[in-house]
Image: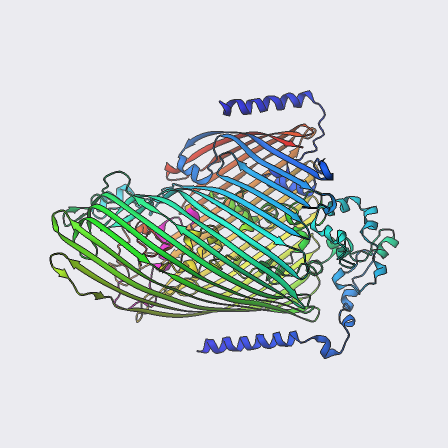
Amino acid sequence: MVNVLGPGLILAIGFYSAFAQQSTTGEVITEAHSSSPAAASVSSSHPAPPQRETIVFGGLRLKNTIEFGTRWRDFDGNEDVYRSHVNLGNGVKLLSSSFELRAPESGGRLFDSVNLNLDHWGGDPYNTARLRVKKNLWYDFQYHYQKIDSFNSIPQFANPLFTEAVRRKIGARQASGTVLGQHSFDLSRRLQSARLDLFPHAPRLQVHLRYARNSISGPAFITVNMGGDEFLINRRVKNSTNDYAFGVDLSLWKVTIGFEQGFRRFKDDRGNTLPGTFSLGNSPDLLFDFQQIFLTAFRRFYFVRGSIPTTRLAVSSRRLRRLAFTARLYYSDADVDYAYARVFSGMVLNRETFLFASRGLGANRAKPRRPHLIADGTMRLRLGRRFAVSETFRGTHFVIAGATTFGEQFTNFDAPEEQVTVEQASFRREFLNAFMNRVQGDYALTDRLIVRAGYRFEHRRTFLQERDRQSIRSSIFGPEPPFDFEPRDEETTQNTHTLFAGLSYRWRRRLRLSFDYENGGHLTSFTRVEPRDYQRGRMRIQFRPSDRWSFTASGTISDQTRPNRTRQGLDLMLRNQNRYRSGSISISWFPQRRAALDVDYTRSHITATIHTLDRDLGNAPRPVLVYREDSHVVRAGVNVILYKNLRTDFGYRLVNTSGSFPINFHRPYARLSLPVHRTMTLNIDYQHYGYNERGRSIQDYRANLLTTSLRLSF
Amino acid sequence: MRDWRYIFKLGALGSSLLIVALIPVDSITGRTRDESQKPSAHQETNASPSTAPAPETQKRSGAEDFVGSTTCRACHPNQYAWYARTAHFATIKSPKYVPPDKGCEMCHGPGRQHVQAGGKGFIFDPRKASARQVVAMCTRCHQEKRIGKCRFHENQHNVEVVACHDCHHPHQETTHDYILRREPPGLCYQCHREIRAQFARPFHHKVPEGGMSCRDCHQQHGSFNTTQTVDTVGGLSAVCTRCHTDKEGPFVFEHISLRSDRCLACHLPHGSVNHRLLVRSEVRFLCQECHGARQGAPSDAPQFVHDLRLPRFQNCTSCHVMIHGSNTSRLFFR
């Protein structure tokens, strides 16, 4: 009822006021709600007159705005996909609220300004609150709260070409398993951060304190692999993190020394259960030795407690004419205590013993640790009026070391007297030493034109050490001697060299142009993937011939080749290639003070060719997999101030993608702002969301959202 | 071994440059401090009635050249009123600050000539100055004091001659935090149009909706990390784990690309047409780009234990559930 009466009442009041008052001063400009680029451009290029301020006790200035209203939703299609994308619902909302209390000319005793902003409260999936209190020379306190609801329940396809016809053709045995990804979640994330800066403008000493808290909770679905099949299970997510930090910045002679000591404490209490009391898994047709795999119960619990102390030290130059330098040292030592327990009943195939088990009880303890050191620095030396040289380095060293023990006891109802216990112990240690060095020279041909060129070297050495032991004990056959798996020691060294060059040109705020080109190698993942050969060119132009016109263009061209040698001793090189092209152009036009037009067009194209080897085809490469994405993104917005201060704002946003995953996501919108009083503006906002997934209609949806709101300023 | 020699040589070269640079120039040239701070001839020729050189590069002025902000207020009352709302106004209020580090003339330079000329010229106007002059003027006070702002001169904005006043406005009508011209992301979108297009895609971080800000992830004044991401407390280089703390670990069995390539190996942070911000629409594409072939594996090792033609093996994460890291299973099963 509120959903219907609320907006109706607001509309009635608004239109009555609009026609009753022929003259509105419209001092309140809805800048915070200029969601469209055009509206934002108008308010930026033609600033609104100052908002109303009220002088309260002590000469303090108070400025307050609040916007509240109601949203209706008309919906058709797959709601899970809509919630994964947009997730806006019906109801009464506090759309935005801004409170500002300010002492004139920074002359307050306790504070110079207090700002409190609240946005999107009342059931929207993204709530934010910001508080800032400061007294300029004494302190600056900031608090930020965010609540973000994340929902994802989209059936991602493993392979859309794997249709039911193909499934039938190759038979049930081959076609077992699902082609859809089953993982989904409905999580709520709360982020809080507070920071207090003491003496923020003091020339010698500044102090800061920080605190942050992050918690995530909610239900989810994931899968578990249990002895030959995958089962869908519930997941309860519950984890939280607390960060504390204290730091000082001390300026001495020509340097500033910064020090910060932080501490993070986190805990994670997850749990899994089987939905229902019976599950045949994803492959009910799949039989092992004529035995059906199934679960009748499954419970799993994780208890994770961790801490990460972090130390940062930085030294940077201060007021040196020719030299600017910074050197930093970061050290952290992450440490985790981990426990895990699970119990199940049903019928699964034990991977270690290749025996069927109808009941199992397992437990796991682990204690990983990760000391991590980063040292980096940069130095810029001006040699003469026009030339400057920069040197940047970064060295990284980390070790991930951990031991884990896992034991599980299995029972089979067919032979209840036989109990098998499997124990596994693993030790793993990974080292990484990496170094990057970058030298760059800048030469100012004129005050407007700067050219630059440089060289970057990257080195990475990794070492992986793994030891595994397994023992199996049977109540009938007794214990077997422990079995040590073959030790695994892998060492990899990778080096890459890259040359880069570019230029930048600027003429006042009218024209700005920059171009960059890089050619060389880029380190990718860890030990098993070769560095990537790449070349990349980027350009950006911004041109403002007058205050009425603005043009922006940017483009990126990138080609990457990743040569992968398959095995030692085999001269077989697979080259995965990634080709990326992107271009964007935008035009903003302000024909007069009361109108603006803003148009963007972006085109991007990705082609990735992926070579893999196949088990059954030996070393012969399989046919190449190709991922292709050809995307057009268009945004057009018009903002017009019509009669008096009646503001309209409408436009269209379109994402059209063809290739491996074709969609046609479009979002037309319109907004009407009608000042009905010096302190009151009526806003009517309409948005449409259409997904239009092409080829597979199960994910399609259309949503129409109408929001009516009142914005009060006092 | 050759690499370490190379690193040693580069380090030695860098250290030498640093030592040379740190030797006070005055001690070599014998010039006095005032002489060494004289602007170059090129800079002096910039002085004209229409625009004066940046205060940072001006010839040292005497106290008699400064007229004080009250004089400026007489002709520029609006600018003064808006300026009074900012933290810069503290330089007027506090007796600690003296010319040239006080009030309007702190940025615009001494105003006596400007006043004597009837308000025509002889004042530093950032709108007509080059980006380098503006940056030099602002960084006179705004040194890289904070740990997060330690690489200002190397930051991409500085390289691409973006000047401070492109984003900040010390005296404009509408006030935003840090005297920004507009609130992010609108401010950032003015140049980064292609990023705005990425955020228009169906899956994106909630920046356009106001749930997040560009500043949550990026350090706009320069960072040592790729794409100028902010530093983090625990992960140091992985900005994503500031919020996604459950992916941080450490794990006994870490998916190492998380630490070396960071999350960008698999995810597009701004926006994607693929769910979970993935770079590819199907799992079989995503994983096999790296795991298609094994470098350095023993010659008799099987390439795959799975028949990748079957759908159940194309959904890698159906079994390898804990793909970010596990403390129990080397293969990320649990």
Q: Is A251 left, or right, of A429 in this rendering?
A: right
**The N terminus of chain B: image quadrant:** bottom left
In the rendered image, residue A471, in percent from the top left (x then y), is placed at 20, 62
Q: Is A265 left, or right, of A130 in this rendering?
A: left
| Label tally | 0
Residue A24 position by quadrant? top right
State whether residue A522 appears in this view.
no
Residue B116 position by quadrant? bottom right
Whether the magenta-drawn stretch holds residue B283 is answered as yes
In this view, B13 is above or below B156: below
In the rendered image, residue A562, in percent from the top left (x then y), is placed at 41, 62
State whether residue A34 appears in this view.
yes
In the rendered image, residue B158, in percent from the top left (x then y), is placed at 63, 59
Q: Is A387 left, or right, of B242 in this rendering?
A: right
In this view, A115 is above or below A21: below
Whether the magenta-drawn stretch holds residue A159 is answered as no
**A208 and A528: which is toward the camera:** A208
Q: Which residues are magenta?
A: B276-302
- State the residue at coordinates (37%, 39%): A696
**B317 and A119: which is toward the camera:** A119
In this view, A222 is above or below A90: below
Visual colour scheme: rainbow
- State the residue at coordinates (46%, 53%): B241
- State the residue at coordinates (63%, 36%): A639
In the rendered image, residue A165, in percent from the top left (x then y), is placed at 26, 42
- State the residue at coordinates (57%, 65%): A314
